[in-house]
Image (cartoon, rainbow, N blue to C red):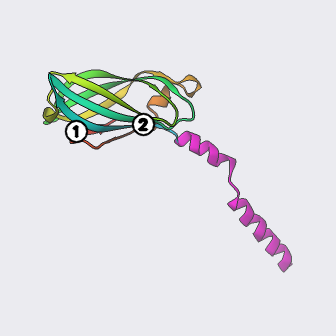
Amino acid sequence: MQARRGIAALCAAAALAAPAPAAAAEEEIGARLSIELNTARSVEGGCELSFLAINGHARDVEAAVFEAVLFDAEGRVERLTLLDFGALPAGRPRVRQFVLPETTCEGLGEVLFNGATDCAAGDLGPAACTDGLELRSRADIGVIG
């Protein structure tokens, strides 16, 4: 009887230690697009925002365009604009820069990623650009979504 219990316990431990097929599915589900506002610097005639984008999906995103809302330092909407990140290859970092004309970086308080107006991601579907979108900022301007 004791031997049977010992074997059952070993089988249960082995089953727990073995990688479950669901774990691989969770990793794919956990894959996401990550966008970081890396720098904001004043340039002639505007504010240049540099973003670092990483496509954590297993497949390329052929096109990603986001509607962004710019808020001033007091939290008021300054303008809506489109940020075209272009193609984002799977697992590869890409830097995209956008110059916001007639805008001072000091006058910006936050950038809201309001959604994707275009997301060509093959069989990943259009939600590949928004589901689990991870946003952060290294600049003095916040990024939310």
Residue 104 x %, y %: 14, 29
- Residue occupying the point 52% across, 40% down: 31
Residue located farthest toward the bottom when viewing the structure as drawn: 2
Q: Between residue 2 and residue 52, name the one nearer to us.
A: 52
Real-space Cα separation, disc 1 to disc 2, in angstroms = 18 Å
Disc 1: which residue? 141
Residue 17 is left or right of residue 129, and the answer is right
- The question of residue 58 being in magenta is answered with no
The N terminus lies in quadrant: bottom right
Q: Which amino acid type is marked by label 2?
A: Leu
Please tell me whether mark 2 sits on a helix, a strand or a loop: loop
Location of residue 123 by image quarter:
top right
Location of residue 77 by image quarter:
top left
Q: Which residues are magenta?
A: 1-30
Residue 36 x %, y %: 34, 38
Q: Residues within 10 Å of mark 2 (few under 14, many from 20)?
A: some
- Residue occupying the point 46% across, 34% down: 131
**Front: mark 1 or 2:** 1
Disc 2: which residue? 133
- Residue occupying the point 83% across, 79% down: 2
Residue 31 is left or right of residue 18, and the answer is left
- The question of residue 16 being in magenta is answered with yes
- Badge number at residue 39: none
The C terminus lies in quadrant: top left
Q: Above or below — where is 123 with respect to 106?
A: above
